[in-house]
Image: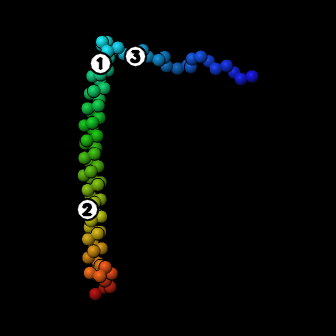
């Protein structure tokens, strides 16, 4: 015999939906809008930091290696032996 499944689960009581005219709705809209702006601003600064400290130096190092390789190979595309 299988145990019966309870009709409601223990835990948090479901909240009532906010009505558009209520003060709680207006407070929620203001808080969410301000949080979205803050998250956007923080995201912009983090992206700029990653770009300036990780991506650009990485590209410069790779380009330096390409130039070193091009200088080490002759016009024929074969590495030159020590002169």
Q: Real-space Cα distance between discs 3 and 1?
A: 14 Å
Residue drawn at the location 28% of the way across and 40% of the way down: 43
Observer-nearest residue: 56 or 3?
3
- Confirm or deny contact between disc 3 and disc 2 (CB under 8 A): no
Q: Which mark is residue 27?
A: 1
Viewer-nearest of labels 3 and 1?
3
Q: Give the image quarter of residue 40.
A: top left
Is residue 42 left or right of 12 when viewed as pictured? left
Q: Position of residue 59 (x, y in %)?
A: 28, 60
Extreme residue toward the bottom, this view? 83
Mark 2 — residue? Answer: 60
Q: How many marks?
A: 3
Viewer-nearest of labels 3 and 2?
3
Q: Real-space Cα distance between discs 1 and 2?
A: 48 Å
Q: Quadrant of the C terminus?
A: bottom left
Rendered view: 41 above or below 27: below
Extreme residue toward the right, this view? 1
Extreme residue toward the top, this view? 22
| Label 3 CA crowd tier, 10 Å (few <14, some 14–19, many 20+) | few
Rendered view: 15 above or below 58: above
Q: Give the image quarter of residue 3.
A: top right
Of mark 1 and mark 2, the one earlier in the sequence is: 1
Q: Position of residue 45 (x, y in %)?
A: 25, 42
Mark 3 — residue? Answer: 17
- Secondary structure of the residue carrying numbered label 1: helix
Rendered view: 2 above or below 44: above
- Secondary structure of the residue carrying numbered label 3: loop
Of mark 3 and mark 1, the one earlier in the sequence is: 3
- Confirm or deny contact between disc 1 and disc 2 (CB under 8 A): no
Residue drawn at the location 26% of the way across and 71% of the way down: 67
Q: Position of residue 11 (x, y in %)?
A: 52, 20
């Amino acid at each position: 015999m299988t145990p019966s499944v309870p009709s409601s689960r223990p835990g948090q009581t479901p909240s009532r939906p906010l009505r558009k005219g209520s003060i709680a709705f207006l407070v929620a809209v203001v808080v969410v809008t301000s949080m979205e702006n803050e998250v956007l601003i923080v995201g912009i600064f983090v992206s700029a930091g990653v770009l300036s400290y990780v991506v650009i130096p990485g590209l410069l190092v790779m380009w330096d290696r390409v130039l070193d390789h091009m200088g080490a190979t002759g016009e024929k595309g074969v590495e030159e032996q020590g002169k």
